[in-house]
Amino acid sequence: MPRSNPVALGLIAIMGVVASTLAAQTTVILPGVKDNTLISEGAPNGTLSNGAGNGVYCGVTSTGNFRRALVKFDVSQIPANAVVTSASLTLNMSRTISAAVQCNAHRVLADWGEGTSSASGGGAPSTPNDATWVHRLFPATFWTTAGGDFVATASASKNVAGTGPYSFTGPGLDADVQSWVVNGATNFGWLIKTDETVTPSAKKFDSREATLAANRPKLTVTYTSAPTATVVSVGTGCHVTSALDLALTATGLPQTGNAAFALNVAHGVPGAQTWFYLAAGTATPTPATPTCNIYLDVPTALSLLTTGISPVGPFPLNGAGAFVLPAGLPNNPALWGQVIAVQVLSADAASPIGAVLSNALTLTFGV
């Protein structure tokens, strides 16, 4: 069996001490930035649309024609380093001609337009840049497939019946929003459709042009923002036998998921037993003195074994007085924003205290 990483385990143990400082969640409510309805009886010429109407439609009409709604939201105000924890698309149904039916939200794969056409569910003559059953942008840019280009698997589904608000939620919807946060150029919104086997099943949802603002489409997103991972060196080490101060450095940054992150000791006594000490919080600057200093924030500077300090080790230094301790970190957002101080103690028989101390590092976990 593979051996557990002692520093990673120590860091995670410290996390339990400071769990109250987890990255805070933020919730935003975003209005729709465009919407439209694809109307099948306008094909093959793409003559009908409803870009500026007060509703968007989906389902099958009493005459067997299809309606598919398009909605899009601007997520650019969400930080690019955010992790989406939940997303909810809310549409208000203001008219229905049938019993319950399942509506499905599919991620759209190409850009589309909202022109000035305005009508009820029957549509109106298309205007420049309207989306139609065959056009992404009327009159010259077409869908690859009539009826819209979208992911076949629904990102979220909702059974709808009577009038009122309905919210689409689920991991697929969360993933869509997350992908748009990372790469806004791929944000083309969702297409809302039924399975189109139930006739009639047409539904009208209020659009962003609806008179009552509360009934317009909205996207509610809750996310956490990851801080930037940093390493800050505090103070200086000391030496007795060796010619240089005991030094502690890091390889890479304490980024979640960084398997290559490591702590490095140099300038110690070859073969000396060495311990890494971890404490919650930042390292404490101490004025330089001729003696070794403790830079961890402890109630007393008499001992590194004070309650609350966690040692990892001992590990022997190599023939050059150095040691590399892998400290690969799990890809766990719960670590974001956590701060740990690390300092090294290494045996040195010539020292009055039998050991020398390194500088300290303050590690802030993030991305």
Image: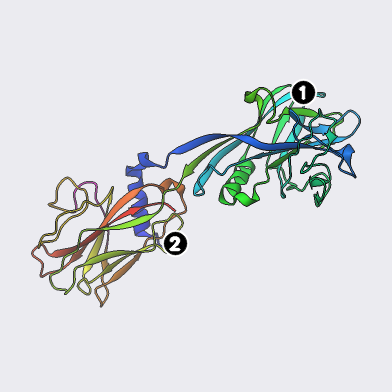
At 77% from the left and 23% from the top, the residue drawn is 95
At 15% from the left and 64% from the top, the residue drawn is 355
Q: Residue 285 in the image: state x and y as whole percent.
A: 20, 53
Report the predominant secondary structure element of the magenta stretch: loop
Q: Is residue 293 above or below residue 198?
A: below
Q: Residue 334 in the image: state x and y as whole percent.
A: 43, 46
Q: Residue 225 in the image: state x and y as whole percent.
A: 46, 45
Q: Is residue 41 above or below residue 267?
A: above
Query: Camera-side residue: 277 or 94?
Result: 94
The answer to which quarter of the image holds residue 38 is top right
Indicate which disc, 2 or 1, sits on the residue closer to the N terminus.
1
Residue 95 got which mark? 1
The answer to which quarter of the image holds residue 262 is bottom left
- Mark nearest the camera among 2 and 1 is 1
Label 2 to label 1: alpha-carbon separation: 54 Å
Q: Which residue is mark 2?
A: 259
